[in-house]
Image: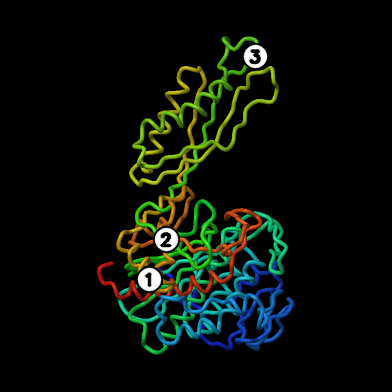
Amino acid sequence: MSAFDNDANSVPRLAERSYQGIRDAARSDHYQNDVAQRHRFRSRLSKSYPIHSDRESDVTTALTLPESGSPLASSWPETPPGADPLPGQLDRWLASRGAELVAVRRHIHAHPELSGQEFETAALVARELAVAGLSPRFLPKGNGVICDIGHGDRVIALRADLDALPLPDGKDVPYRSTVEGVAHACGHDVHTTILLGVGLALAQLAERDELPGRVRLIFQPAEECIPSGAPDVIDAGGLKDVAGIYALHCAPQLPAGLVGVRSGPFTAAADTVEVKLTGPGGHTARPHLTADLIHALGRVIVDVPSLLDRRVDPRAGVSMVWGRVHAGEAYNAIPGEGSIKGTVRVLNREAWREAPELITKLVQDVVAGTGASAEVIYTRGVPPVINDRMASAIIAGAAGAALGPDRVVEAEISMGGEDFAFYLEQVPGAMIRLGTSTPGSGVKLDIHQSGFDVDERAIGYGVRVMVHTALAALSTVSL
């Protein structure tokens, strides 16, 4: 059943409906109601406390909106020079909501949820969209949200991911993670806030019948794990009638205000391979009487990646790297079993499809002369992200319109994995990189580091880019 046919998953539009009514209490005890409710613009957010009324002005969060005159409030990005204004006075609307969006991002950052457990974050998103007069729907598990804006047969989808990483938050900031060992170290809190801002902005246009089609917001769970959440979204009907799909990802390599765009390979497929070797074991003084398992493991570790490089077209971008080795305990005993585990990353779809069979054969061939027995466990992860040429041109043009053409640069290829690839196997689309570092700052932190943070002006830039993208894609009939 499609998520669009399941009324049980829908969120009522009534603005006065309590946030508590759309939460799953059984999944929310660990927060003790400690999630922000809808709040009016310019309202002040205060320290956390349980909600005991249904008034819209009730807010629970550990954060405060930026003070007037503060660096953040005064530096919230205005329409960049050379950029095209957003339609319907949305530039003015976005400027007025900037501090509020920052507060939402900080709240999500302070209350991260691991893959598959994004119930509170999904409920917060659904509440905000419902108050704006939209009709969000939860995914069947309740940890993701889909929401259509506007009308028409042509649908353009925009996707954000909700989950955090199992890492400690090492920052000394007011919005530091309140969940031990869990942190938004990949920027998904920013992705979610940007898409929420886009939805609220597009709702303004739809209300005035100025949205030339239908835009679908996809707030996806479980991007950071295998199996990931994109297939669940697809199974729930998330791509039904979709003509194209777009997304962005935080890029600390770029300063805030810049975006990176690239057609073709964008991120790599990411699989895991484990090799288990077994043998009789024996004394290190007499390796000729047994199978020298450590030697055999060493052969696999060194020879298989090297042979793989010679068996695959180098333009396919294949990388095989071991990350774990385990064998034996005693220094003078040849163990009877050992294992290695690593990753296989590929930029080319065809090479990715052929990798399991080829790698399994290479392992068996290398081990054959050692006397050991080999078992290869190859686990599929995510396909490569291959940006569609036309979709890349659309989002590049939209980014240029949103920020100015000089703020659009060529994105580098990443060997990291992204489950946005599952959508691109179904419909054309593109992902871009959103600059998040503070211009001129000497601090360079990568994603998946416990100290990762962003220049929050990137939120405004991201909203502008994705609103322009949605409008441009709706107006391009060839996609």
Q: Quadrant of the N terminus?
A: bottom left
Question: What is the spatial separation of the Cα atoms under label 2 and label 3, in whole angstroms?
Answer: 58 Å
Q: Residue at 41% across / 62% down in the picture?
A: 234
> Earlier along the polypeptide chain: callout 2 or callout 1?
1
Amino acid type of the residue that numbered disc 1 sits on in the rendered structure: Ala
Q: Tag 3's secondary structure?
A: loop
Q: Tag 1's secondary structure?
A: helix
Question: What is the spatial separation of the Cα atoms under label 3 and label 1, in whole angstroms?
Answer: 66 Å
Residue 180: x %, y % from top left: 71, 59
> Earlier along the polypeptide chain: callout 2 or callout 3?
3
Which residue is labeled 3 in the image? 284
Amino acid type of the residue that numbered disc 3 sits on in the rendered structure: Thr
From this viewpoint, is residue 235 visible?
no
- Comparing labels 3 and 1, the label whose residue is closer to the camera: 1
Residue 125: x %, y % from top left: 55, 74
Q: Is residue 446 above or below residue 375?
A: below
- Quadrant in the picture for residue 472: bottom left
Which residue is labeled 1 in the image? 398
* Residue 221 numbered mark, or none: none
Q: Residues within 10 Å of mark 3 (few under 14, many from 20)?
A: some
